[in-house]
Amino acid sequence: MAIQSNSSDVEVVGGIPLYTGIGAMSVVAVNPTLGELNAIGVKMKTEPEYTGLQFSDDGPVYNKLVFWIHNDEHSFTTRVEFLVTAEERRISKTGKYQWINKFGQTSWGETNPSSQYDWFKDEGVRKAYGGEDVLIDFIKAWANIPNGGDLEFDSPADIFKGKITELTQLVMALKDNKVRCLLGVKDGKYQQVYTKYFGRLKPKRDDMFVRALNDDYRQFKAEYNTDLVLQRYSPSLVESNEKAPEPLSATEESW
């Protein structure tokens, strides 16, 4: 007898299976066309829009960088999105800009922060674009770049204007690499990917995810299972965007 059973709490009729927990993900596409989506098994009816998004009449123009990621263990594909803008990131109340260097380090200040902080290296310093810090964190983990390793695009302005040639090349160059992502579910039906922290495959540092989740400014606005083990979504096994349990003691990882 062959019977594939599931817990009664798991919805199996209709819809796309949803997952929660931390999974090792391959990046299979960035800002794909409708045809490219179909080729990787993602069914959509209309051509996706990635550029020229404006949420208020006098607000900045945003673009989307959408990375489609695949998990081999459970054989599913989902996406992680970054909303970016070609405008320099600045806090209007203080006049401080976010700065970034060629190593992917970021800091805030009215002027180049390398003169204030010994840890912030001066090479390639410039004002960061909106959303650049989160994108860089993702690429740093995905490309497994060592601390102090180069992380600099040839034409960063183009990327934040929606021209993604360099990112497309990166998908091809890193086709064998994986990045650890935390998945959750919003409103019981929408797959979400946590963007406040991304992990390398080695060392496996679940405690770094927990630390991020416990930060008031880095909570996950989705449901996730607190043991963080990747599994099919079940409402009885997850909790809403509460702080995660305190991590076990572990050596700090400097990024």
Image (spheres, grey):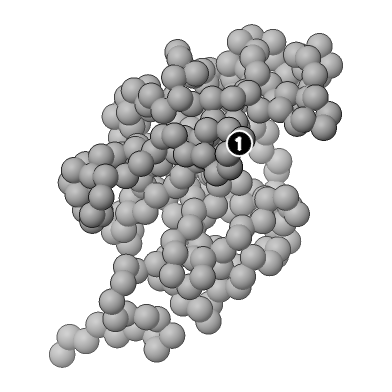
Q: Is residue 141 visible?
A: no
Image quarter of residue 117: top right
Residue 50 locus on image (x, y percent): 39, 38
Q: Residue at x 83, y 29 (%)?
A: 94
- Apparent side of residue 105 relative to residue 184 in the rendered image (left or right): right
Where, quadrant-wise, is the C terminus in this rendering? top right
- Apparent side of residue 74 relative to residue 83 in the rendered image (left or right): left
* Amino acid type of the residue tagged 1 in the rendering: Gly
Residue 23 locus on image (x, y percent): 44, 55
Residue 23, compared with residue 95, is above or below; it is below
Disc 1 packing (10 Å; few <14; some 14–19; many ≥20): few
Q: Residue at x 35, y 45 (%)?
A: 68
Q: Residue at x 68, y 21 (%)?
A: 99
Secondary structure beneath dot 1 equals loop
Residue 77 locus on image (x, y percent): 32, 54
Q: Which residue is mark 1?
A: 59
Residue 137, compared with residue 213, is above or below; it is above
Where, quadrant-wise, is the N terminus in this rendering? bottom left
Q: Is residue 169 visible?
A: yes
